[in-house]
Amino acid sequence: MSKERSKKLLPWISTPLILLVFFLAWDLFVRVYEVSELVLPPPLTVFESLAEVVADPVTWDHARVTAIETIGGFLIALVCGVAAGVVLGKVAWMERSLRPMIVASQVVPKVALIPLFVIWFGFGMTSKVIISAMLAFFPIMLNVQLGVRSVEAGQREVMRSLSASRWQTFTHLELKSTMPYVFAGMEVGIVFAIIGTIVGEYLGGSEGLGYLVVRTLNELDAPALFAVIILLSVLGLMLYFAVHGLKRFFIPWHESVYSQQDVNR
Amino acid sequence: MSAHSAETIEHASNALDAPAKLELSGVGKEFRTKRASTHALSDINLTIRDGEFVSLIGRSGCGKTTLLRTLAGLVSPTTGEILIEGRSLWNGSKVDSSVVSKLGVVFQEANLFPWYTVADNISLPLRLRGDGKQDRRARADELAELVGLKGFENSYPRELSGGMRQRVAIARALSIRPKLLLMDEPFGALDALTRERMNLELQRIALATKATVVFVTHDITEAVFLGDRVVHLTPRPGRIRQIRSIGFERPRSIDVQTEPEFGAIVRDLRHALDEEE
């Protein structure tokens, strides 16, 4: 029992320790090599700046904008990605006729298209929502498409031998069996959505944490720049763990969830 | 030809014993593709009476699985008729779902649904048919006990061994109280020791539920040990070569396998199988 508990507690002890070592090394490096504060400020300066940034209510407005853009784009991507994935996974001729386009769209560096979207949809939130939706769409669609196809033949046969209706086969088998793929797509998709939003904010607009990064850079305020980056990382972590939590809630039976629990145990 | 006469004798004696549960007459199956057609089954005639346990054996490719799949309503026969309790299973290439709902099928793989617990897997057929939650739970508990999985009702399939999973699959097939239990090499993927135990368990379950069973296997000993009769199929096209009645009273203990008569039957069947190629 105590052994299991200690295994569960391990990441909660190891992670702060690793972070502590990291910050100490950082501090030591800056002191020994006398690095300019403009290039790499010492961690304590960054923390002071972080405290200031966090205390400023304007920062929270920016963070809210980034969060809304990311979540909005992600939700659009989720709905469109699942729908497109199901259609492409089910309708063979459609998948075949669209495959070259899908491959092409995979290869094109979509981040390179972001300036265009800024031109087309303006400097406001719309362009960022669209960009993050576009980036998150593909991993979700591809995973769902794979998932729809991966329903086990033997399990289908069970449903057939029970003369299950199409709807029953969908709800008891196809939907359940595709869920792990949907969540795998979502975990990649949410990260892509954040990237899309931030790059969109870099390139145009006057709102969001991405905009704050550019502004602090232009002000040559390196400590504040680091502070905003930390905030962005925290936002990204929160969104990722939200998706991960949903996955653990909805598909506790799946090996990607329970094997992890076994490890933690 | 000798197979044919053996069958007619069986036919006559069965008629006195019990009503026919399953009747196959002139069942044939041809698979046609663009390039070739395969004659998988040809002129299968077989009558199985209520409560009987019939093993189907043959080399791989002899059509035994195809035959079972036609019985399960998964593959339509090209010719012939299949009657289950006097009602036709197939209308041309369309299956009569009210007849299929009297069947229980167990496949080589357990094919459980990992998102459902053992109890939910067992009672899935009842759920599809629209039974209430309490009835389903009661039946699942009852069946879990029957197949020796009491205490595992709320476990997930991943927590079970291969043998236990196959028990769940058997319980699932039994949940609707099938008139006919069809099993396609259900223990083929299990190790020899587990398999032997499962054979004893299956015999006990079959007798306890008075089930009529058609059991496909390529293991001669297993076929003889379990079956009231053993049907030997030969390939290309798949047809019945011989039907052996196994005289030992069921239930049989594992020791029956050491009896000389048992050994003789197994040896006979093995020679017959070896003669093909």
Image (cartoon, rainbow, N blue to C red):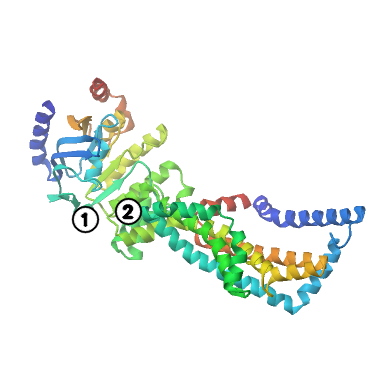
Quarter of the image for the N terminus of chain B: give it: top left
At a point 32% along the width and 49% down the height, the residue shown is A157
Residue A31 pos. (x, y %): 91, 56
Rendering quarter of residue A208 = bottom right
Q: Is residue B13 above or below residue A129?
A: above
The residue under label 2 is which amino acid type? Met
The one of B170 and A44 positioned closer to us in this rendering: A44
The label shown at residue A81 is none
Residue at (31%, 24%) from the top-left corner?
B258
Give the amino acid at mark 1. Ser
Give the residue pinned by disc 2.
A159
Mark 1 sits on what residue?
B97
Q: Chain of mark 1?
A: B
Q: Is residue A265 visible?
A: no
Q: Which residue appears farthest toward the bottom when viewing the image? A: A57
Report which quarter residue B131 is drawn in: bottom left
Residue A89: where, in percent of width, then height? Answer: 41, 55
